[in-house]
Amino acid sequence: MSPENKLLPKRIILVRHGESEGNLDTAAYTTTPDHKIQLTESGLLQAQEAGARLHALISSNSSSPEWRVYFYVSPYDRTRSTLREIGRSFSRRRVIGVREECRIREQDFGNFQVKERMRATKKVRERFGRFFYRFPEGESAADVFDRVSSFLESLWRDIDMNRLHINPSHELNFVIVSHGLTSRVFLMKWFKWTVEQFEALNNPGNSEIRVMELGQGGDYSLAVHHTDEELESWGLSPEMIADQKWRVNSHKGEWKDDCKWYFGDFFDHMADSDKECETEAIQEEEEEDDEEDKEVNLLTNTEDNNEEELCNGNS
C-alpha cells in the first residue's frame, strides 16, 4: 500500500439491521415510533451471524494481523441492538471506538404510520418516483441523500485529520450499521450514481453486508469482495458493474472516460474535435439557409399564383 493510502480504511462496510418487528408486521408502526421498533428474536440471531461474518472477513488477511474496527451506528433501537450483537464477535482491543450518527438514520416516513394510508402512499411514490417523492410529514430519498452527503464530509475529515488517532501500522475498517435505503443512498453518493440508477437498486436484506474495499490504486470498489452475480442481484447494471471492476485497479481521483453517466447521458451528440464542431455548425447553418430559401420560394410561388388567379377572375 502506498504511503498516501496508509491511513485510509481498508474497508468501508455497510450493514443493514437485523429483522425488526416492523419488517415482520408493518402494523407495528401504527403504535410504536419508528425509532423504537425492536429486533425480533430472528433479527438478534441474524445480527450475531453478521458479526461472525464481519470478523472472518476483516481478520482474513494474515499479512495484516494488527487490524482495527471503528463503528458508526444509526440512533434507532434496531440498529443499536444489531451493533451490540455484532460486537460479540470482537475483543475490546480490536475496536477503536463507536459513534452514534444521526445522519445515517432511517428515512423519515412521518410519525405513527397508519397501515392502509401508508400502503396507498407508497403506491403514489411508485408513480411519482422513489427518489424525489416526499412522504407527508416525512422525507424523500433526496432528503436522505443530503444528510448522508454531510455525513460523508465528516467521515473524510475524521480520516484527513486523523481524529480517530489511527496507528499507521494498523489496518483500519469502518463498519456503518444503518438502514436499507440509507445504505443505497450512501453508495449512490460515493460512486456518483444517477437518480435513474438509484431507483433500479434493490434493498439489502436484513443484516446483509456490502463491502467497499480499497483497491491497489487507492480507489474503493464493491468488486473486490463481491461477485458480478451479487452486484447484479443488487440492481447494478452491466455498465455499473464494469465501473466497479475498473475501480479495483484505478488510482484515486482518476477519471473514467467511457463512464456514460458522467458524460454520455448528458452530451450524446458532441463532436470529437473543434474542427468537427465547426463543420457541423456550418452544415446546420447551410441547412437552415436551405430551409429559409424553400420557405421564400414557397411564399413567392403562392403570391404569384394568387395574383394570377386574381387577374383571371377580373378578366
Image (cartoon, rainbow, N blue to C red):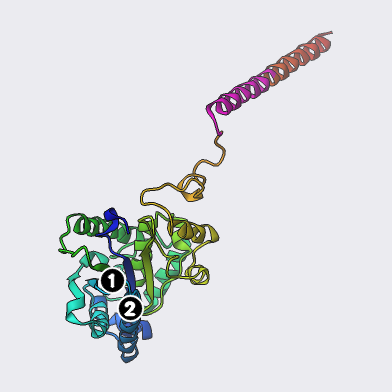
**Residue 83 can be seen, yes or no:** yes
Give amino acid for label 2.
Leu
Indicate the position of residue 296 as horizontal and vertical percent values.
68, 17
Numbered badge on residue 165: none
Q: Quadrant of the N terminus?
A: bottom left
SS at mark 2? helix
Magenta segment includes 178: no
| CA distance for labels 2 and 1 | 9 Å
Please tell me whether residue 140 is drawn above or below residue 40 in the rendered image: above
- Residue tagged by mark 1? 175
Q: Residue at x 31, y 61 (%)?
A: 144
Indicate the position of residue 248 as horizontal and vertical percent values.
43, 59
Q: Is residue 224 or residue 294 the one in the foreground?
A: 224
**Residue 73 can be seen, yes or no:** no
Q: Which residues are magenta?
A: 272-293
Q: Quadrant of residue 26?
A: bottom left
Give amino acid for label 1.
Val
Q: Is residue 101 or residue 249 the one in the foreground?
A: 249
Please tell me whether residue 188 is drawn above or below residue 227 in the rendered image: above
What is the residue that sits farthest to the bottom in this orientation?
Answer: 41
Indicate the position of residue 257 as horizontal and vertical percent values.
48, 45
Q: Residue at x 38, y 71 (%)?
A: 210
Asked if labels 1 and 2 touch by Cβ distance under 8 angstroms, the answer is yes
Q: Residues within 10 Å of mark 1 (few under 14, many from 20)?
A: many
- Left/right placement of residue 20 relative to residue 291 reads left
Q: Earlier in the sequence, mark 2 or mark 1?
A: 2
SS at mark 1? strand
Q: Quadrant of residue 164?
A: bottom left
Q: Residues within 10 Å of mark 2 (few under 14, many from 20)?
A: many
Numbered badge on residue 54: 2
